[in-house]
Structure formats: structure tokens, C-alpha cells
């Protein structure tokens, strides 16, 4: 993700989060300029228009005969929204399912357990272990709460480095039970249960109360969960990073789109090809940036198959005749960690 480094030209490293938010907040419709650092070397300014934005916890829709549901965060409402998505997919006659957990930072353990229970017939979903034995908990699944039969509905879970905590609980539970194939990148690795204790209006203390364990009795803290099928996005070269910053500062895409509104996909591709001659960037990325600008005043698209390599791979795998055997033969997290320990002890 991007790192906010300044607001209206004011450096922020020494500012508290409350001070940063105070600078960002303001009257709806007024502009605010922020400096953004992307990666290690790319820095540029972006002017945003303040607006009242409601961030949903779940977004969903059909991609062909595949139900696609993106979980943004695990809140008390997320299980209800997931149920709505599954009922919608059922009405549409879906044949397979993609659960997108990319960049989901986590949330409530009760929320993720309730969602996992919709897929797991029996056994533990997650357990928490504390130094105090009486504080240990096990969240078990119940067959009468199962909504999706994974025998008839192949499932892919999309993960990346931003998938953390409760996202890893759901990923680990489905993986250890051989119910889904994980596609993308290794997850963040937050396997701890924490509680924030306020000390004042602006200060607090975060205490680790316990660690959580997947159904194969594995903790992934500071390790993460590896995907069964790894799909990474190409890293930008130094030359490409410089070209990207130069292009953003020149504001060429915004100016071009303002003169060519309602561009078609063919026109977007043509302009991306032209732009790549001046700015040596992958045309797939350029099409994404142009498309985002064209749709700037529209609701955000649910997915972008042209740009999203991980989603494209998930759809490809779901069509594979070997999908079931890939899920069945995928190693549990316990088996993977045991292999690592064995190699380290050689």
C-alpha cells in the first residue's frame, strides 16, 4: 500500500495519528493535498476532494458462473453480508466460489469463526492459547450451520501480504480442512490476540493476550500462510519507478481523459500503447491507471480482470480438471512447518 508522508506540504513523521486525521478531515467538497510514497523511491503529490464515504465490509457479484465475494474487514455485520452474497450466488446458479481476502487486516474472531462455519462441517475452526490455561478457547464448527457444500462448489481463496489476523484464520481453517485452494502471496503473519487498554483520550496500551492456532494446531505469527499457488505482480524497475513518478507529476492521464471522456476499452488500450512509448511502463498497468481515471466519477468496479493477475489465475484454476486433487493434496500448515523444521535441523 501507499504511505502518507505529508499533508498540504506539512511533513508527518512526527505527527500523531490524531493530528494526521485532523489535517485530513474537513468540509465535504474541499480539496486536500497529500504527498504519497509508493514503494521505496516513488514520491508524488495527489489532491483529494473531501467526501463522506461509507466503506462496506463485503462486496460481491458474479464472474461468469463463479461467485466472487470480497471481504474487506471482519465486523459484527460481515457474516450477515457474506450470507447475503451466498444467497445471491445460489439464485444465480453459481458453480464455484472465490473468496477475496487480499488486504483484509482482520477484525473480530467471532465474526470470522461464524463465516468459516458456513463452509466447515465439523471440527475446530481456530483455537486460542494463553499463558493462563483457563483463558484458552476453541471455536468449533457445527454441521447444521454449513451453508456451502465444498464437494460441489470448488473454492479459491485469494491472499496477499495485506491479509492478516482474522483473514489468516479463515485461510488457515479452509486450507487445513482441504476445502479451498489458496492463491496469491504469503500472508502478513499476525497470529496473536490483542486487547487495547485506553490510558487517556489519546494514549493506550496494546497487550497480547493469547496466540491463535489453525485446525492443524499451527501458529503463523511472524510467519504467515503461504499460498498453494503463488502469483506475484511484477516489481517495478528503478527506471519504471522514475517513469511512473514523472507521469503522475505531469498529470498526463487526467488531462487526456478530461478531453476524451467515456473512453472504450479499445481506446484505453490504444492510449496505453501510445503512453508506453514515452513512459516505459507495462501496458497492463497503464490500462489500469487510465481505466481508473475514466471511471473516477463512477462507483468502484468490483474487479478488473485485465489487470488482476491473481484473480485471473483463480478463475483459470477453477476450470481445471485437477482442481479437486490439488485441494486434497495440498499440505496443511502443520505439515509445511514440520518440513521447514526438518530442513533447518539437517
Image (tube, helix red, strand yellow):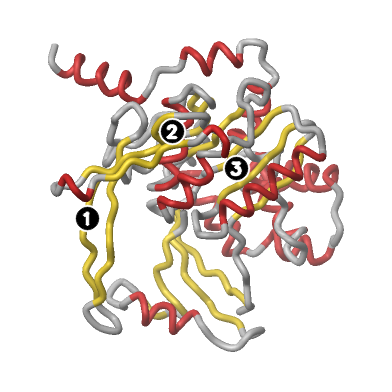
Q: Which residue is mark 2?
A: 173
Q: Residues within 10 Å of mark 1 (few under 14, many from 20)?
A: few
The answer for how far apart the CA atoms under marks 2 and 1 are is 22 Å
Report x, y in % for residue 135.
22, 50
Which numbered disc covers residue 208?
Answer: 1
Does residue 211 sit above or below 183 in this rendering? below
In the picture, measured across the screen, residue 8 lies left or right of residue 124, that is right
Q: Residue at x 42, y 30 (%)?
A: 123
The answer for how far apart the CA atoms under marks 3 and 1 are is 43 Å
N-terminal-most mark, 2 or 1: 2
Among the 4 quarters of the image, the one containing residue 199: bottom left
Secondary structure at badge 2 equals: helix
The answer for how far apart the CA atoms under marks 3 and 2 are is 39 Å
Q: Residue at x 82, y 38 (%)?
A: 92
N-terminal-most mark, 3 or 2: 2
In the picture, measured across the screen, residue 206 lies left or right of residue 276, that is left
Does residue 201 sit above or below 220 in this rendering? below
Q: Is residue 215 visible?
A: yes
Report x, y in % for residue 219.
28, 36
In the picture, measured across the screen, residue 328 lies left or right of residue 314, that is left
In the picture, measured across the screen, residue 108 lies left or right of residue 191, that is right
Q: Which residue is mark 3?
A: 281
Amino acid at each position: 500500500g501507499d504511505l502518507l508522508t505529508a499533508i498540504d506540504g506539512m511533513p508527518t513523521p512526527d505527527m500523531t495519528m490524531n493530528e494526521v486525521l485532523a489535517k485530513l478531515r474537513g468540509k465535504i467538497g474541499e480539496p486536500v493535498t497529500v504527498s504519497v510514497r509508493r514503494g521505496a523511491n516513488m514520491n508524488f503529490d495527489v489532491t483529494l476532494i473531501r467526501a463522506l464515504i461509507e466503506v462496506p465490509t463485503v462486496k460481491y457479484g458474479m464472474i461468469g458462473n463463479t461467485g466472487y465475494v470480497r471481504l474487506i474487514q471482519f465486523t459484527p455485520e460481515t457474516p450477515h453480508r457474506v450470507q447475503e452474497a451466498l444467497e445471491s450466488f445460489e439464485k444465480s446458479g453459481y458453480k464455484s466460489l472465490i473468496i477475496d481476502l487480499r488486504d483484509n487486516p482482520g477484525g473480530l474472531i467471532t465474526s470470522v469463526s461464524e463465516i468459516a462455519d458456513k463452509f466447515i462441517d465439523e471440527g475446530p475452526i481456530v483455537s486460542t492459547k494463553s499463558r493462563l490455561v483457563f483463558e484458552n478457547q476453541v471455536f468449533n464448527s457445527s454441521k447444521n450451520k454449513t451453508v456451502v457444500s465444498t464437494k460441489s462448489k470448488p473454492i479459491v481463496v485469494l491472499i496477499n501480504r495485506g491479509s492478516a489476523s482474522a483473514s489468516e484464520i479463515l485461510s488457515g481453517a479452509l486450507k487445513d480442512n482441504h476445502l479451498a485452494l489458496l492463491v496469491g502471496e504469503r500472508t502478513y503473519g499476525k497470529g496473536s490476540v490483542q486487547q487495547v487498554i485506553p490510558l487517556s483520550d489519546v494514549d493506550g496500551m496494546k497487550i497480547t493476550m493469547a496466540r491463535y492456532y489453525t485446525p492443524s494446531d499451527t501458529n503463523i505469527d511472524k510467519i504467515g500462510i503461504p499460498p498453494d499457488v503463488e502469483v506475484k505482480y511484477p516489481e517495478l524497475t528503478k527506471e519504471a519507478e522514475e517513469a511512473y513518478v514523472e507521469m503522475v507529476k505531469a498529470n498526463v492521464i487526467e488531462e487526456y481523459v478530461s478531453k476524451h471522456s467515456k473512453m472504450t476499452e479499445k481506446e484505453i488500450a490504444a492510449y496505453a500503447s501510445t503512453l508506453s512509448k514515452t513512459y516505459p511502463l507495462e501496458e497492463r498497468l497503464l490500462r489500469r491507471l487510465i481505466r481508473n481515471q475514466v471511471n473516477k466519477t463512477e462507483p468502484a468496479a468490483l474487479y478488473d480482470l485485465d489487470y488482476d493477475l491473481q484473480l485471473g489465475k483463480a478463475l483459470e484454476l477453477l476450470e481445471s480438471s485437477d482442481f479437486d486433487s490439488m485441494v486434497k493434496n495440498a499440505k496443511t500448515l502443520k505439515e509445511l512447518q514440520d518440513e521447514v523444521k526438518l530442513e533447518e535441523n539437517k
